[in-house]
Image (tube, rainbow, N blue to C red):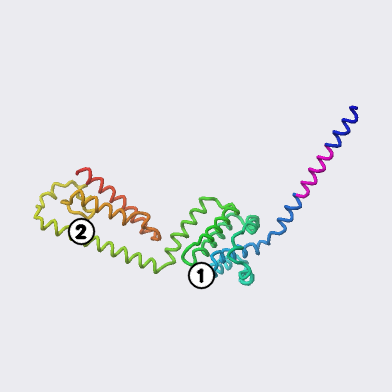
Amino acid sequence: MEAILIILMLAFFLVRVLAFNERKAKELEENSSHYRNIPSYEQSIICIIACMMKADGKVTKRELSAVKNYLLKTCEDEDDAKERLLLLRDLLPEIDKETAQDIRLFCIRINQMMNYKERLAFLSMLFQIAVADGMISDEEAKLVQQYARFTCIRRIDFVNMQQYYTYGYQWQEDKDRRSKYKQRQYEQEEEQENQNGQRSNQNQQRGQSSTQNNNLSADEAWAYKTLGLSPNASEKEIKKTYRTLVQQYHPDKQIGASDEQIKYATERIKDINRAYDILMEKK
């Protein structure tokens, strides 16, 4: 009886082992088939570029220019770059806005063949395509994030590059926007000067003596000058001017500005806050 029981246990164990081996063989075959279906390295690069260009449903000359510059820098020679551009030209009509949303398979090949520095350079080129028409669509943003996720781009590197291209790059490229921004800034400064002149005239008309100015400390004199106010300004005037200046130089108002202008606005905000605190302590 015991012998029969042992034989049955061995038979059950053998069946389990065979079933396990068969399941593993199927999984291995499926995985092998999956990776065999991944395009080559060169095709993966062109496919990702094509998907990025068709993500918003339109292809522009500036996008093509960004791609050409990238290929000329990374290809072995000019003939190789031309071949890839021809492949891109043939591939673009086959990709529509819907099918351009999945680049995972292509990213697998990129991750296998490129080092980290090369993957970052390719990410930069994708951002250039995205901002070529002046804005980044939701579809383009999703593709860029998808590429970064499946090619193991570090988050800090992605965020830094995203900030550069969504702010700094557009500022460098959009000269019309830059000139409009400067003109608006000049108008604001002129308006502020006019307001200060009007306040000065009003104070002079009130006939207040200049002896009050001599009683100010160096910090108070600096604070009034920083806010563009006379020493006779009321608490209400100080608060109103403070709010106006903070809104003018707030970081949210500097989107698209140059590094020098952002630095100037940051220092100006610090001075405005310090001047306000000095004056409000005396009120």
In the displayed structure image, the side of residue 17 where residue 234 appears, left or right = left
Q: 215 or 228: which is nearer to us?
A: 228
Give the mark, 1 or 2, whose residue is nearer the N terminus: 1
Magenta part of the chain:
13-26
Q: Which residue is label 2 attached to?
A: 196
Give left or right: position of 258 versus 212.
Answer: right
Q: Main secondary structure of the magenta part?
A: helix
Q: Which residue is mark 1?
A: 62
Whole-percent x, y for residue 108 in the image: 64, 56
In the image, is residue 101 above or below residue 80?
A: above
Residue sitting at x 64%, y 59%: 106
| Furthest-top residue in this view | 2
Q: Is residue 54 above or below residue 271?
A: below
Viewer can see residue 252: yes
- Kindly check if marks 1 and 2 are in contact, taking CB atoms under 8 A apart as contact: no
Q: Position of residue 215 (x, y in %)?
A: 13, 46
Closer to the camera, 26 or 121?
A: 26
Amino acid carrying label 2: it is Asn
Q: Is residue 129 left or right of residue 8?
A: left
Which image quarter is the C terminus in?
top left
Q: Residue at x 59, y 60 (%)?
A: 101
Q: Position of residue 35 (x, y in %)?
A: 71, 56
